[in-house]
Image (cartoon, helix red, strand yellow):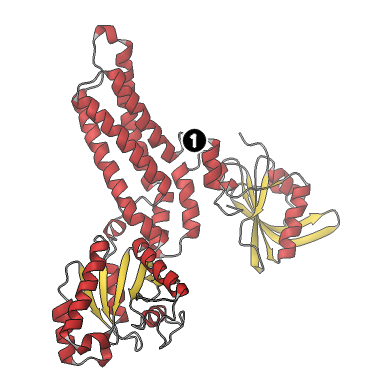
């Protein structure tokens, strides 16, 4: 039970049209009433919950600001406890003066995420929903917003709670059997229990598999732009972003470090990484940049391999050499989508284009794309190609997608325990041995929703929230 009253700025710090100061706790309405003078002359604590009141924040003979006060009584608030929200003018001076006033009158400055922590402790949301609040605030694309909103509304946690409830029911029956061990009775129907194990295993595997999609949709899909020096990697990055983000020069080796920037394509966030050109070099600094290029290729979800058009125009021998280099890159990264981007396609003849398509268009595991980064021709087609690599089917069909690495870890552990239970069933082990693994699976389910928590876990989760939320 939390007995103190906390206060914090709920809107971003700085100057704005308005700012919102949130006060939550058992004494919030009492403390606010002492320094709010309503235009209606009515006392704040006498008003109904979920009402808004015009008036002034005052202290003795001093008036701080004309404000609107929103009133939330009892448990009918975000935090599940009495709450007052003060909408004042957005001057940083006014904001701080009002906060300082209430700090002197018995409030305590809220810790990061403490309002949401109280919502969790007061049963307004479970732990996975609380974590989704932070994801929702941090969302910067349609996909990440949709994922966070789905989890905050309880889509993921309700699925886990239902599985836990069904498993707990059978666990109780098996535990009951232990009390009647001498009588050799069976309360838990083994056939129904087997069906439940099959169902749980399928759901857990689907959720675990969804993390591969959810993680990249939440954090952005890293795309490495690689190739030899002077093939137009920086020009391509600038064309994608529609701004001069990277320095473009005819001098080979201009890019010596990676340059990263983000672009939202059809609601999906892509993180483009312009890398140093791959070549043999004696320059120590450029060599470090090339080393970083190979590191970024490993980290990327998609690789754009830029090809030098002038190099390809000269002879078929050079195309074969290029095919060999592409195959080497593909063999080192067999799971990554590889797009062969032929830049400067505007200077190619139709004969050149036909030859390039015939030679480079049939390499296994690759997609061929011709464009002119300088003239920004073919850029939209490239964006559409990138979208085809992202599995948004689950997102569009509103399926549950796991995005949180803590949840992912707990799901893996839960699946491991369920597989142990399944093994025990197959070997016809006694109920006391099955019960041990079932309890562990229930524990990991409870970790996700917060039915089983520790102070350290809560501290780590809510420390990443912003103050005021």
**Are there few (<14), some (14-19), or many (20+) residues within 10 Å of tag 1?**
some
Whether residue 36 is visible to the viewer of this picture, yes or no, is no
Image location (x, y in percent) of residue 5: 68, 43
Of residues 79 and 406, the one drawn nearer to the viewer in this rendering: 406
Image location (x, y in percent) of residue 266: 35, 70
Q: Is residue 66 left or right of residue 252?
A: right
Image location (x, y in percent) of residue 279: 34, 76
Q: Residue at x 28, y 19 (%)?
A: 431
Task: Say if 91 sits above or below 189 in the image.
Answer: below
Of residues 433 and 183, the one drawn nearer to the viewer in this rendering: 433
Whether residue 133 is visible to the viewer of this picture, yes or no, is yes
Which quarter of the picture shows residue 57? bottom right
Image location (x, y in percent) of residue 281: 39, 76
- Identify the residue at the far front of this view: 282
Q: Residue at x 44, y 45 (%)?
A: 128
Q: Residue at x 24, y 25 (%)?
A: 424
Which residue is tagged 1?
453
Q: Residue at x 55, y 47 (%)?
A: 462
Of residues 304 and 289, the one drawn nearer to the viewer in this rendering: 289
Tag 1's secondary structure?
Answer: loop
């Amino acid at each position: 039970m939390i007995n103190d009253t906390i206060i914090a700025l709920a809107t971003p710090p700085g100057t704005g049209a308005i700012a919102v100061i949130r006060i939550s706790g058992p004494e919030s309405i009492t403390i606010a009433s002492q320094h709010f003078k309503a235009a209606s002359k009515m006392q704040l604590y006498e008003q109904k919950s979920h009402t808004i009141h015009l008036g002034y924040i005052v202290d003795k003979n001093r008036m701080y600001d004309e404000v609107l006060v929103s009133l939330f009584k009892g448990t009918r608030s975000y935090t599940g406890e009495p709450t007052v929200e003060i909408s004042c003018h957005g001057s940083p001076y006014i904001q701080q003066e009002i906060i300082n006033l209430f700090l002197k009158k018995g409030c305590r400055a809220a810790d990061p995420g403490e309002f949401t922590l109280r919502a969790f402790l007061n049963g307004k949301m479970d732990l996975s929903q609380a974590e989704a609040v932070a994801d929702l605030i941090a969302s910067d694309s349609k996909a990440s917003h949709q994922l966070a909103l789905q989890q905050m509304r309880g889509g993921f946690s309700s699925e886990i709670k239902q599985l836990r409830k069904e498993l707990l029911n059978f666990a109780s029956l098996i535990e009951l059997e232990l009390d009647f061990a001498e009588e050799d009775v069976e309360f838990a129907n083994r056939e129904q229990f087997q069906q439940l194990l099959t169902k749980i295993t399928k759901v857990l595997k689907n959720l675990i598999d969804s993390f591969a999609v959810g993680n990249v949709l939440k954090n952005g899909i890293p795309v490495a732009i690689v190739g030899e020096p002077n093939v137009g990697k920086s020009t391509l990055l600038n064309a994608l972003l529609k701004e001069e983000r990277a320095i473009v020069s005819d001098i080979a080796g201009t890019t010596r470090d990676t340059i990263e920037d983000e672009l939202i394509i059809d609601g999906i966030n892509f993180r483009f990484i312009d890398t140093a050109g791959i070549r043999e070099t004696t320059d120590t600094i450029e060599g470090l940049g090339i080393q970083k290029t190979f590191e970024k290729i490993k980290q990327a979800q998609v690789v754009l391999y830029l090809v030098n058009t002038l190099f390809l125009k000269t002879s078929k021998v050079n195309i074969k050499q290029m095919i060999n280099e592409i195959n080497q890159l593909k063999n080192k990264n067999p799971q990554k989508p590889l797009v062969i981007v032929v830049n400067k396609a505007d200077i190619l003849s139709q004969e050149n284009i036909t030859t390039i398509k015939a030679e480079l268009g049939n390499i296994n595991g690759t997609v061929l794309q011709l464009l002119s980064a300088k003239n920004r021709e073919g850029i939209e087609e490239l964006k559409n190609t990138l979208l085809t690599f992202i599995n948004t089917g689950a997102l569009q069909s509103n399926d549950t997608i796991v995005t949180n690495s803590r949840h992912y870890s707990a799901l893996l552990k839960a699946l491991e325990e369920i597989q142990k239970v399944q093994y025990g069933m197959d070997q016809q082990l006694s109920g006391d041995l099955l019960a041990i693994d079932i309890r562990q699976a229930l524990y990991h389910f409870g970790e996700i929703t917060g039915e089983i928590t520790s102070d350290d876990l809560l501290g780590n989760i809510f420390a990443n929230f912003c103050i005021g939320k």
